[in-house]
Image (cartoon, rainbow, N blue to C red):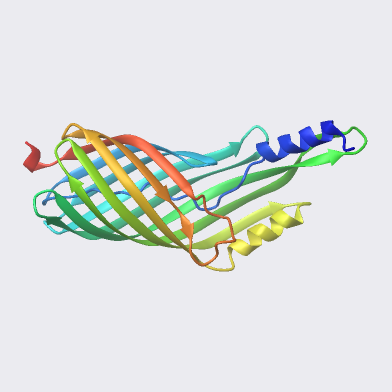
Amino acid sequence: MKNPTKIILFLTVLLSSCSHYYYVANVQNVPLFKEKNEFRVSGVFAAGDESIGIEVQTAYSLTDKIGIMADYMHVKGGDVSGKDYGKGNYYDGAIGYYKPIKEYGVFEIYGGLGGSTQHHEYSSFSYDDNTGTYHDVYDGKSDLSFMNLFIQPSFGITFDFFDVAFSTRFCIVSFTNVEKNISGNTVLYDEINTILDKSYFYLEPAITVRGGWKYIKAQFQASYTGNINSPRIYIGEEAHISFGLFFTLAERLK
């Protein structure tokens, strides 16, 4: 019969291990402009199965058809004290076309470019036969950066006190630099090497719901990140939800 203490320790290791994701999708910026000279700004808290982050998003309608937007995200996850974690920053900017549809509907499509820098440190568990216990082994660190080319169509309805929108973002993520200092863990070393082999295509459907006052609304968004061309390479975090506040400045609301 197997030693039950070893089984419990093994299950604890599995449940407490950290998955490193090298692509975490930011919250989709869905401004739903209706006319020229409208301004949007939002601040949100976002989370996935391993990551937590904060984001600031802005958007402005240059004309009655053209809008621009810019976003910033800081994200982290893992166990800092155990030296098994990741953290990073992401920025993007986009320009696009929007069209009001009748009184409440809006169609929009944006295309943009983003970039990320991130730092990871790794540790793993090793079993000591002499003591019968597991202990942490430091495996090293890596620094990565990528570029993200994306297009995002969406359709929504917007009222003074309520908005709902459905959007889908298509991304091409290409890692431009990977610096690593890994020792003793060949599986991890090879895993990081494979990241540079190709570009990764992601399809990211999302739903955004807002409610509140015409100038300020609470916002909730849920999204999914699906890897199209390399579904067995798990470098992207799939599920993502966010909560925050969405502010609107528009002449038509006065």
Report the quarter where the C terminus lies.
Answer: top left
Q: Is residue 61 left or right of residue 2?
A: left
- Residue shown at 56% from the left, 50% from the top: 21
Q: Residue 241 versus residue 82: which sits nearer the camera? A: 241
Report the quarter where the N terminus lies.
Answer: top right
Above or below, 246 against 185 in this view is above
Would you say residue 234 is visible in this rendering? yes
Query: In the image, residue 223 lies at what x, y percent?
Result: 40, 48
- Residue shown at 16% from the left, 54% from the top: 62
Q: Residue 52 versus residue 61: which sits nearer the camera? A: 52
Above or below, 190 against 46 in this view is below
Query: In the image, residue 58 lies at what x, y percent?
Result: 27, 45
Would you say residue 26 is visible in this rendering? no
Query: In the image, residue 244 lies at what x, y percent?
Result: 33, 35
Query: In the image, residue 119 lies at what x, y percent?
Result: 57, 47
Q: Is residue 204 left or right of residue 32?
A: right
- Residue shown at 29% from the left, 52% from the top: 166
Farthest residue in the right direction?
A: 130
* Number of numbered markers: 0
Picture quadrant of residue 220 = top left
Picture quadrant of residue 46 = top left
Q: Residue 103 versus residue 130: which sits nearer the camera? A: 103
